[in-house]
Amino acid sequence: MQIKNIRESHHTNKVFQTIKQMRPNEHKNLLKFLKSPYFNQSKKLTHLCNAFIILTKNGDDNFIKEKLWAKIYPSKEYNDIGFRKCCSDLLKLIELFMAAEIYFADEKKVILDKIEFVTEQKIDSLYKNIIADHNQLSNSGNYLTQMDYYYYYQFERKYHRLMNFDVKMNQKLNIEKISDNLDIFYLIDKLKIQCNAKIQQFISAVEYDLNDSDAILLLCKKFDLFKHPELGIYYYSYHTLTDGENLNHYYQLKSILEKNAQSIPQQEAIEIFDAALNYCIGRVN
């Protein structure tokens, strides 16, 4: 009876289940992460994680807690509370590893935090390095997504503070860049919401009170929609949804898509092209 309880315990072990769902390259990176004393100072937890990974590689669906315990504490008698504590601590480190993987994969987040650090600590010798990193990243592509505009807004805000513009006189500041990037980020998001609301109205006949539509569309005209293609895509998508009889909206949308199709992130491109195709089907019908 005791053996049965031991063998069934894996069903509730979150660490084992989490590691089973991770890919082999993530297993390798996780072990590197755990071996770093900056994040983890317990070699026992690294050994426990490696034992779980080996079980996963072998295709095992079961494990016996006493055997795992013996791998990390060979001279200690099994302690269930101690084993649960080790699993809990390991799970927290795995969750931190997941966050680190996402964080370091996003160069923009790293740059924003670097500029924050050097500004707080006043490390002026690194100012040019941070700006050079930003400029190199900025020149890597022409198509800007909504989140790119949010990044540029944040960067310009931090750059304003870094250069201490608030106390400099007789110099044109980067206030316009801050304002424009924030506006475009906001407008794209509002247009996405309004397009989604219109689609839901068509599907389920549910009404949404979005009484700021006119103001949003008016503000969009401040910008060149072909120089800011994502804004143009959702601007003309909204008009296509609300004024489908005016074919000019569709042709403007098509023109922007043709010029930027290869640069649009895949999932977003699928949604946009599906919407355009559905409009075409509707017109044909």
Image: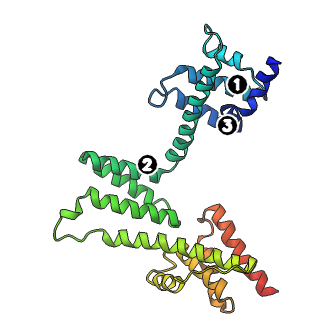
Colour scheme employed for the rendering of this structure: rainbow
Q: Are marks 1 and 2 in contact (CB under 8 Å)?
A: no
Residue at horizontal 70%, vertical 25%? 54
- Residue 60 at least partly seen: no
For badge 1, the amino acid type reads Ile
Secondary structure beneath dot 2 equals: helix
Q: Residue furthest left?
A: 169
Compared to residue 248, the image places residue 273 above or below, namely above
For badge 2, the amino acid type reads Val
Report the front residue among 2 and 283. Answer: 2
Q: Is residue 261 left or right of residue 171?
A: right
Residue at horizontal 50%, vertical 66%? 142
Q: Which mark is residue 19?
A: none
Quarter of the image where the C terminus is located: bottom right
Q: Which residue is under mark 2?
A: 110
Disc 3 versus disc 1: nearer the observer:
3
State the image quarter where residue 97 is shown.
top right
Residue at horizontal 54%, vertical 33%? 93
Q: Which residue is under mark 3?
A: 18
Secondary structure beneath dot 1 equals: helix
Are there few (<14), some (14-19), or many (20+) residues within 10 Å of tag 2?
few
Disc 2 versus disc 3: nearer the observer:
3
In space, the residues marked 2 and 3 are separated at their CA atoms by 27 Å
Say which label, 1 or 2, has the lower sequence index: 1
Q: Position of residue 254 (x, y in %)?
A: 64, 80
In space, the residues marked 3 and 1 are separated at their CA atoms by 14 Å
